[in-house]
Image (spheres, helix red, strand yellow):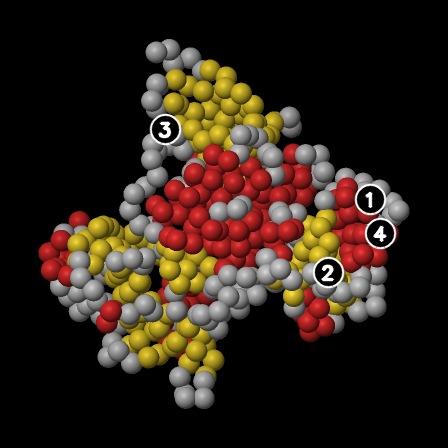
Amino acid sequence: MSNMAAHSGSFDVVIVGRGPIGSTLANLLGLCGIRTLVLEREAKAYHLPRAVHFDDECMRVFQTIGLADAILPHITLSPGMRFVDAEGRLLLDWPRPSAPTAMGWNLSYRFHQPDLEAVLNNGLERWPHVELRTRCDVFALEQNQDGARVRYEDLATGQLVDISCAYVVGCDGARSLVRRFIGSALDDLGFHERWLVCDVRLSEERPDLGDFSVQHCNKQRPATYIRGTGNRRRWEITVQPDEDAAEITRPARVWELLSPWLRPAEAEIERAAVYTFHSAVAQQWRSGRLLLAGDSAHQTPPFLGQGMCAGIRDAANLAWKLAHVIAGKATPDLLDTYQSERAPHVREFIELAIRLGGLINTKAVESALATGTAQGDGQLKLDVQKPLLGPGLACGDRSMTGKPAPQFRSRDLGRSDDRIGYRFALLCRSGLGAAVIEQHHARLTAADVAVICGEEAGRLDGWLDQHGFDAVLMRPDRYILGAVRTGEDPAVLLSGLAFLAPLPNAT
């Protein structure tokens, strides 16, 4: 077989990496009609557990791409996390509500990553303009003012392939090749620890282990217990500096470390591996036509379960912006808001994870406990407030800009996002929507803005009253762009779409 480079078509976006972030981004771009190619080095998705948690925002993104119902059978709700000392006394409680949040979904889900990846990858087959190629090892990237080129080796044939595209997104992990071509250094946030990650499958019922995740804050050997789906359970156990990774992953040693909770007859070890948990954020997420998402752009310790969640938020933020730029509806400058909005958000989550890691390792107990609030019974309860987006797009009253907008149930009990789709939406109180549509139909149509009003969305009026708004403009990624106060014209918010191509005058 000749190894001369072959040209293999042109795409709008090439995504390097088919993990959950790459597949979610590809599904979002498919939804937008963007010609997308996903290049993956491996032949099949990794078959063992890795990420085990995602939140209500992620599930809302999966709803957006039409895959929430397919994911539901593969997940279980998490009731929360508890931090206990070496004697088992409760230090800090972090419960999750059993009812759905304002996002329309539950706050915390457990999942088996191969199951999730199968749903996301199968979802790509719905889009005729999205292609997945496996066993493709990308080795070179080039760009100029007209586009980008991706070169890879087809590992099945040895052929070198040359692809042209408008943009390349690296979803290729912590050792990202795309990040190296961008030339971005990493800001080190100071947390680097080795932990043994041990996944087991129970061979008999162990209800005493419980459904809560448990952080064992033990000076001698900090550890985390995580209840997975079905009979899967995980322990993450600190590796001491003088311990050898090969030695500590021997089955006899693993069972010794698991002995406080489990006996060999009760479970089968599915995987035991030593990982170094890092905390870092890339200094540059975009260089021209090259961009980063997920672990390529940031790495977080696992104590908040926000690693994959952060990458899913990256995809939701980036996809609609790429789609608008590629369609000629916005200039490439819109892509500058991707890092400015996402990097401070993920950095705040990483810093909170580091503080909680300090509690687990009993190295900074007072600082970590300060993240909790005292309850009437004297115990501390953790209530994590999600960060705002960093500076970027905004309009009108900005007091809610950068916060996720709620999802509302329509009168027929449907979720409002399903009607809106992956686009902008003007959320108006009752009595205003019809007038806005009549007076500004051309502008709404040109900007592809849905209008949802209180008559058709339960609790929308009450939410607007709570904040003193008549209307809110929601972005495709479900974050608030801006609002207008009671008595102001909701159409003022359309000026917040000035980054789009010139819109028609009001008609």
Question: On the rendered structure, is 79 left or right of 49?
Answer: right
- In the image, what residue type sits under mark 3? Arg
Nearer the observer: mark 4 or 3; the answer is 4
The residue indicated by pointer 1 is 442
> Which residue occupies the foreground of this view, 245 or 157?
157
> Which residue occupies the foreground of this view, 186 or 493?
493
The residue indicated by pointer 2 is 453
The residue indicated by pointer 3 is 135
Q: Residues within 10 Å of mark 3 (few under 14, many from 20)?
A: some
User: Which is more N-terminal, label 3 or label 2?
Assistant: 3
The residue indicated by pointer 4 is 438
- In the image, what residue type sits under mark 1? Ala
Q: CA distance from mark 1 to mark 4?
A: 9 Å
Quarter occupied by residue 260:
bottom left
Q: Position of residue 140 (x, y in %)?
A: 46, 27
Task: Please report the residue visible at 51 percent of the width from the left and 36 percent of the height from the top.
Answer: 126
> Which residue occupies the foreground of this view, 93 or 431?
431
